[in-house]
Image (cartoon, rainbow, N blue to C red):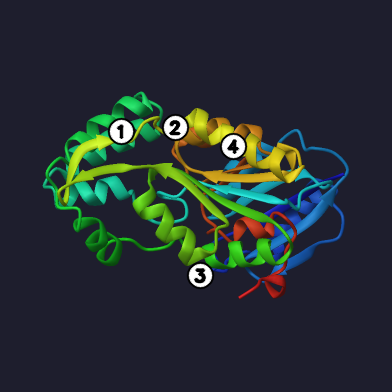
Amino acid sequence: MFIATLLTAPDRPILDRATVETLRAAWNGGETLWLDPGVAVEFTLEAMPADRWQMWEQLQAHGIDLVVQPAEGRRKALLLADMDSTMIQQECIDELAAEAGVGAYVADITRRAMNGELDFEAALRERVGLLKGLPEGVIEQVWTDRITFMPGGRELLATMRAHGAYAALVSGGFTAFTSRVAEALGFDENRANTLIAADGVLTGEVGMPILGKAAKLEALEQISARMGITPEQAMAVGDGANDLAMLNRAGAGVALHAKPSVAAQCDIRINHGDLTALLYIQGYRREDFAA
């Protein structure tokens, strides 16, 4: 048995009954269950539709995401999340670079690295090197003035944890930010890279070893083993090429507003919904969300 979920941005509840019923009838689906009127709905399927991606493409043009997945085991016991452009709306290193006067240059490197065009570790070392001499206090300034949370993050964490799930923030960014994000949103733990500072300024170096693609996969496997579960019982979410190993190993790997080259390699692609989409695809209804 499979579940088809249609969803859109909660602040644009454009999902209508006619669209849903047209697809349900075409796929001979079961009874519809509205998880949030205008925002998310699901129905059962006996088999995976052969034209799933053609329908996905058509719905994308109307601002609607479509996810089809096995019904069994879709509610997960572990959440692993990327931070930059996933749990927050910015790339922290780009914001630091803007304060250092090299924002546009660093942002281009970030874009290319996240799209898989550059080696992640080499790109990170190059970008951090450009921060040399930046006052350490700028980290607090960037956190206060520039960083905003991705919509739906608090509901995602609160709801999954209320149902017994464990949540880990695993980032190729920096502990100076992951520690703050983890505390604000309610993650159980966080892992990231360390910016090195001396005498109150950044040295332009990052602590070794660098947490990259392999380390994110290792975190998934380590935490799953520690919990006594399999990676199939985990949900991972991210947007960049360094997230792919983690996304492809987890039972549900969600490409959230991801780079096209990343989304193309994932079965679950959320381009219009926010982080509450990760709850809807697990079968949570809006009234189930924890505050």
Picture coordinates of residue 251 (x, y %)?
A: 71, 39
**Residue in the picture at 18% in, 50% down:** 98
Q: Which residue is mark 4?
A: 247
Query: For this rendering, which residue is in front, 141 or 89?
Result: 141
Q: Disc 3 versus disc 4: distance between alpha carbons? A: 27 Å
> Secondary structure beneath disc 1?
helix
Q: Earlier in the sequence, mark 2 or mark 4?
A: 2
Q: Secondary structure at mark 4?
A: helix
- Residue 123: where, in percent of width, then height? 30, 29
Residue bearing mark 3? 11
Q: Kindly identify which residue carries mark 2.
A: 212
- Residue beneath label 1, please? 124
Query: Between tags 1 and 3, which lies in front?
Result: 1
Question: Rounded to the nearest whole Å, what is the CA distance between mark 1 and mark 3?
Answer: 35 Å
Which kind of residue does numbered mark 2 sit on?
Gly
Q: Amino acid at mark 3?
A: Asp
State the image quarter where residue 194 is shown.
top left
- In x, y percent, where is residue 209? 40, 30
Along the polypeptide, which appears first: circle 2 or circle 3? 3
